[in-house]
Amino acid sequence: MKPKLLFLLAHAKIVLLGVLQPLGIWGVAALAVLDTSSIAIPMDIIVAGYIWADRKHFWLYALMVGLGSAIGALVPFFLGRAGGELVLLRRVDRAKFDQLHDRFARQSFWAVLIPAAMPPPTPFKLFAFGAGVFEMGILPYMAAVFCGRTLHYLVLGILTVRYGPQIVNMVLHQASRHTGAMLLVVALLLAALVLFLWQKRRQKNCAAK
């Protein structure tokens, strides 16, 4: 049953790509909605192909992917809001949960933006789910996803225009080989951000006294 299900999903993905790819920027936006909401799609490779065929408008593709991603990412976000707290409370006690909630609330925008800007296989949906669990505001959440994804595809677009679409395969290959290192980079960036904001707040409090 499992192999059959995987076959059906793969077939559905091929059909979707065939239907949406001819739609240009609107097809890219629709694929981004699917990618962040449910079906994993090789967006970097697809977008690089679009950009290589229309290099003058690489920035427009980045914006449309950012918009589609922000809309699609509402699915894991609302799933987190609906039942994510119960899932987490099975793993941590209430005091720990409240502590995590407070930490996320202070740096929620960057905690979503940084993973959204990272290349695959960064588990972005996990961060999107966490944003819902910890009740991040919808508009700040969508803005963080939009900014992160747009930044990612602007960089991808510049690299594609300069070096060709093959650069994407090289980057993805290296990223898949060093998944642990990438996750460590994300963790270090978030930790550095937390430290920076904490020091800034501490200096502000000292100045006020």
Image (cartoon, rainbow, N blue to C red):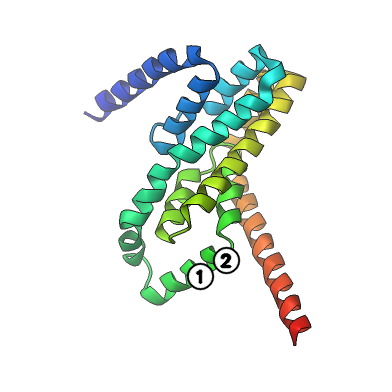
Which image quarter: residue 189? bottom right
Asked whether residue 180 appears in the rendered view, the answer is: no
- Give the image location of residue 114, x and y in percent: 61, 49
Q: Mark 2–mark 1 contact, CB under 8 Å?
A: yes
User: Tag 2: residue type?
Assistant: Arg
Tell me the crowding category of disc 1: few under 14, some 14 to 19, or many 20 or more residues within 10 angstroms, Cα based: few
Quote the CA–CA distance across marks 2 and 1: 6 Å
Q: Quadrant of the N terminus?
A: top left
Secondary element under disc 1, as helix, strand or loop, is helix
- Give the image location of residue 162, x and y in percent: 77, 21
Q: Is residue 207 above or below residue 201?
A: below
Residue ID for mark 1:
102
Secondary element under disc 2, as helix, strand or loop, is helix
In the displayed orientation, state which residue is furthest to the bottom: 209
Q: Is residue 107 above or below residue 116?
A: below
Asked whether residue 98 appears in the rendered view, the answer is: yes
Q: Count the numbered circles shown.
A: 2
User: Tag 1: residue type?
Assistant: Asp
- Give the image location of residue 159, x and y in percent: 73, 26
Residue 149 vs residue 155: left or right? left
Which image quarter: residue 40? top left
The residue positioned 76% from the left and 77% from the top of the image is 203
130 and 139: which is toward the camera: 139
Which image quarter: residue 188? bottom right
- Give the image location of residue 165, x and y in percent: 66, 19
Q: Quadrant of the C terminus?
A: bottom right
Tell me the crowding category of disc 2: few under 14, some 14 to 19, or many 20 or more residues within 10 angstroms, Cα based: few
Residue ID for mark 2:
106
The residue positioned 57% from the left and 66% from the top of the image is 106
